[in-house]
Amino acid sequence: MKFTKKQNAAVVAALYSLCIGHWTTEYTKETKPDKNGDPVEVTKEKKTYVEPNMTAVSFWLCNRMPEQWSKSPAAVASPTESGGVIIIPAAEEEK
């Protein structure tokens, strides 16, 4: 199956939205009586924040920046390469 540029762009936008988090709005309709007792349809709006999805973030980074975020063993630094823990000295107390 071949996708159009528009379809691919929609998927990229959806994935990006999952990565950064987004607001979604849900609408519900209820029927309530008005002042005269006649039924009136009322639309309610509820906004909800969807937290960033870490699986989507990992997917995005591993595919868009594989040199820095690859999950393959070849991407892990070998023991001969420099690396390790950086020790930051504690700040001196002000007198």
Image (cartoon, rainbow, N blue to C red):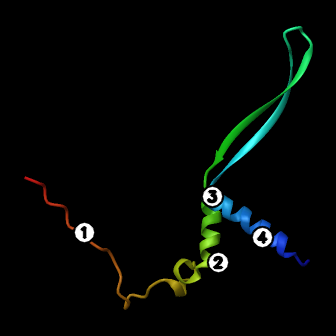
Q: Is residue 11 left or right of residue 50?
A: right
- Depicted 42 relative to depicted 47: above or below: above
The residue where tag 2 is placed is: 63
Q: CA distance from mark 2 to mark 1?
A: 32 Å
Q: Earlier in the sequence, mark 3 or mark 4?
A: 4
Which amino acid lies under the numbered mark 4 shown in the image of this protein?
A: Ala
Residue under the image location 82 percent in, 33 percent down: 28
**Viewer-proximal residue, 1 or 27?**
27
Q: Position of residue 93 (x, y in %)?
A: 13, 55
Q: Is residue 67 above or below residue 58?
A: below
Whether residue 13 sits left or right of residue 87 in the image: it is: right
The answer for how far apart the CA atoms under marks 2 and 3 are is 16 Å
Q: Nearer the viewer, residue 83 or 28?
A: 28
Which is more N-terminal, label 3 or label 1?
3
Q: Considering only order in the chain, which callout, 1 or 2, is on the residue closer to the N terminus?
A: 2
SS of the residue under disc 2: helix
Q: Earlier in the sequence, mark 1 or mark 4?
A: 4
Label 4 crowd bin: few (<14), some (14–19), many (20+), radius 10 Å: few
Label 3: few (<14), some or many (≥20) within 10 Å? some
Disc 1 to disc 3, C-alpha distance: 31 Å
Q: Which residue is mark 1?
A: 88
Question: Type of residue at label 2?
Answer: Asn
Q: Residue at the spot x=72%, y=36% of the render?
A: 46
Q: Are marks 1 and 3 in contact (CB under 8 Å)?
A: no
Q: Are marks 2 and 4 in contact (CB under 8 Å)?
A: no
Q: Look at the image and tell me in which quarter the N terminus lies.
A: bottom right
Give the distance between the C-alpha atoms of the residues marked 2 and 4, in whole angstroms.
16 Å
Name the secondary structure under disc 3: loop
Amino acid type at circle 1 is Ile
What residue sits right under mark 3 in the picture? Answer: 53
Q: Residue 55 sits in which quadrant?
A: bottom right
- Residue under label 4, please give it: 9
